[in-house]
Image (cartoon, rainbow, N blue to C red):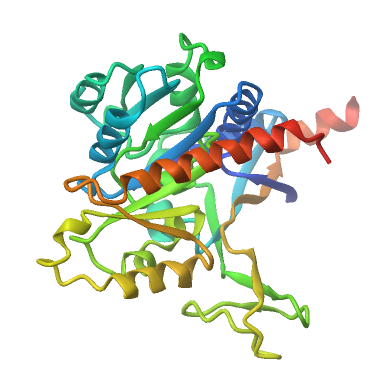
Amino acid sequence: MHEMGIANSILEAVATEVRRRPGSRASRVGVRIGELAAIDADSLTFCFDALSRDTDLEGLQLEIEVCPRRHRCDPCSETFDVHDYEFACPKCGSMQTKFVSGDELELAYLEVEENESSALAEKSS
Amino acid sequence: MNQVLLQKKVLSENDRVAESLRDRFRQNGVLCVNLISSPGSGKTTLLERTLEILPSEARVAVLTGDIQTENDANRLKRFGFPVKQITTGGTCHLDARMIEKHLEDWDLAKLDILFIENVGNLVCPSSYDLGEAAKIVILSVAEGEDKPLKYPSIFFQSELLILSKTDLLPHAPFDVELAEQNARRVHPGMDVLHVSCLTRVGVAAWIRWIEQKRAAQVESKAQPAG
């Protein structure tokens, strides 16, 4: 149950990004979570909403992309999703496959709305 | 509307501190290992068995994490090595900042091995890099063989699985082979050791594993970076 800490880290990163853009408002943040990252998406969303309530970031949407475990086959270079710990290459059947991704815990993007006064300020500057 | 690409890790601040710790450990020739298991699998007891057979001049220290109490530090201090308790006050894992803070008054140049005993938990500690050279997961034979499949993250990240409490095997319906198979499904090629802290069978092999790991680290430091 460390989703609270993760949610807090996401909100801090968003706040830092918003501070760099005076007058803007963040509307949506995208995160990528690998299935090996030990993060529960529902729990993260719950914590995120609870922590952002009554703050400048209230209403910020969290979009979570869950990333499967992926392996690459040594002999034939096929890259494939691993389901139920089945590591054999679906193309050539080799067991010589290596982990390439699936443990992500990354901030992907942030959608910000520039409000008019800041857009004007930018134009006049 | 403006979309800004961020492309950075959520825990980048923790990772930054962990990387600086890792550098310090390497510079000072300290092997740091992070012991992780569910509560009650025997992390502290394994450390007791370890400290009791190390020679008194061994340059070893322990940081032990719990949500509350100094109990573990008190158990481990009896062996005369530097031991510090980290009480997290509710947090279910250790993070790199806690390690950095608790190392402040220790001279790393005087250490060869630092054991970190994480908070008992198979989930959350897997997200937080502490700057360790290796994570080690402990699973007791009183638990289920399918734990590696249920908690893949920590088994995937750990270099070594210690099956603990093996003295209970005659009494526990635990299939050792299946447990190892499950661990290697999640993490092909992971090392596995069997240890009983009651009979001490396997403790020597565990110490050898640590010594080899430290020798490998010292050797890799001696080689010019490639």
Q: Position of residue B93 (x, y in %)?
A: 37, 38
Q: Is residue B116 left or right of residue B75?
A: right
* Whole-percent x, y for residue B94 in the image: 40, 34
- Up-down relation of residue B90 to residue B155 (above or below): above
Name the side, left or right, on which A79 lies relative to A36: right
Quadrant in the rendering for residue A89: bottom right
Is residue B11 among the parts visible in the rendering? yes
For residue B169, which quarter of the picture? bottom left
Q: Residue at x 29, y 52 (%)?
A: B195
The answer, for residue A39, to whether it is visible in the render is no
Q: Residue at x 90, y 24 (%)?
A: A125
The one of B127 and A24 positioned closer to us in this rendering = B127
On the picture, is B137 further left or further right than B134? left
In this rendered view, identify the residue nearer to me: B192 or B146.
B192
Furthest residue in direction left, as rendered: B171
The residue under the point 42% across, 18% down is B102
x, y percentage for residue B147?
32, 65
Q: Report the residue that reaches farthest toward the top.
A: B105
Task: Give residue A84's position: percent from left, percent from top.
Answer: 46, 79
At x 50% / y 53%, what residue is drawn?
Answer: B159
B153 above or below B225?
A: below
